[in-house]
Amino acid sequence: AIYYNPAGLARLSGPHFYYSHRVVYGATEFRRARTLDWSEATHGVPRLVEFEHVSNEEPLFALGPMAVLSSDLGTEDWAFAAGIYAPPAVGKLKFPDDGPQRYMLVEQDVMMVLYTLGAAWQPHKRFAAGLSFAYVDVPKLAFEMVVDGNVSPKQVNPEKSRFDIRTRVEGEDRMGFTGNFGLWYEPVNGLQLALAGQFLPIRIDSKSHLSLQAETLELDDEITITKNGVPDDRVTFSMTMPMKFRAGIRYVHMRQDREVFDLELDVHYDLWSMMDQYTMDAGITTEVMGQVLDIDQVIIEKNFRDTVSVRLGGDYNVIPRWLTLRAGFFYESPAVRDGYAFLDAFSFHRFGPSGGFTLHLPHADLSLAYTWLAQNVLVVTEEESRIYQQMPGSPCPSPYTDTSLCNEHYLGQPAAPANAGTYQASYHLMNASLAVNF
């Protein structure tokens, strides 16, 4: 309730404790599309480069806890709750350091914790409303990729560059907020309607530090990072998490004042279009073998689109007061536009079944659940690609058509396409929870 619809808190009487833990196993693969390497052309004929499959080297993500305390505090119309949880996501990704995906992503490590307070009011037995507000804490946000530090005109190296530099941004944002509202209404016995949503987006501005490491060059000293001639590696890494809205209808079949089964249909609308890009504001200067590289701002285009998810499920009390079985199915439209596919978010056409059960014990419910999240295979061609190698020192200016400074084989592009290829992903979600009624 505190996460999906805080109005549901009003339907709990007395004190309650809830703990759940989510484990995700993600099988994600990428094979970069073959490309022509014009930097090593022989007699005007480029070299054809083919790449191997790569996959996430840390597919198991087990940091998905939630703990909540709730109580009506002896009142008739009110209920209150306090909770701490990590939002549903895969926060850890690790791909090969020298893999063909390195111009997109080598590693991502994000930890996010929400500390939440909620309250619900039920002035009538058929209606309830609720609000919850969360303090958002991001104790770690790390993002690592390889950039081409070449500053010479017309130089584009689609496979590897002599001036490849591994770039790592790592920091934190310990101050953020979001909020949820919820409404619940039962017009007639057995039919329930609900509307809820996260009405405040989460803005992340991670105060970070930037580190640079030469991939190919053997340097005597570490690469220095300065601002106005003074050593300073501070940068800001920014992104926006979306608002989300939900509506649902539920039918409950009763027999002799006992629930026999229920069916629920939910529709979710998530405003992922709010996440249009990742931005690193740097304003730093570095030097590699006499090449001075100024990095003002690095932008990774996301250009997400809003998603719609439809979810149908139900419960059946096989053994009244002792055992409930559950099953469901969902579909979700893709947030990722084909040309902007990226290894941090495999959000294509998604669908999958769920199943689980609850064992009702004296004053406690023990639940287990499993979801298989399947996705279609996505193929991005170089012509469709809109994610390019980062070349912050390139003298080729936008719109990238100056033939005296830009490579003639990549006119109209800032560099070589980085995200063309084949994307495959599926996820296995396992959840266990314990709900205690005092």
Image: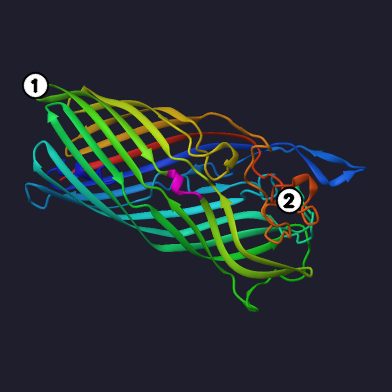
Instruction: Pick whichever, 337 or 400, lies toward us.
Output: 400
Cα gap from disc 2 to disc 1, whole angstroms: 76 Å
| Span colored in magenta | 272-276
Q: State the residue at coordinates (68%, 72%).
A: 224
Q: Is residue 230 left or right of residue 24?
A: right
- Residue 415: image x %, image y %? 71, 50
- Residue 70: image x %, image y %? 19, 49
Q: Which SS class for mark 1?
A: loop
Q: Are circles 2 and 1 on residues that touch, CB within 8 Å?
A: no
Name above or below for residue 285 compared with residue 126. Answer: below
Q: Nearer the viewer, mark 2 or mark 1?
A: 2
Q: Amino acid at mark 1?
A: Gln
Residue 55 bears which disc, if any?
none
- How was the colour assigned to the protein in this rendering? rainbow
Name above or below for residue 141 compared with residue 386. Answer: below
**Residue 347 forms part of the magenta stretch:** no
Crowd band around label 2 with a 10 angstrom C-alpha radius: few (<14), some (14–19), many (20+) = some
- For mark 2, what is the residue? 401
Q: Which SS class for mark 2?
A: loop
Crowd band around label 1 with a 10 angstrom C-alpha radius: few (<14), some (14–19), many (20+) = few
- For mark 1, what is the residue? 256
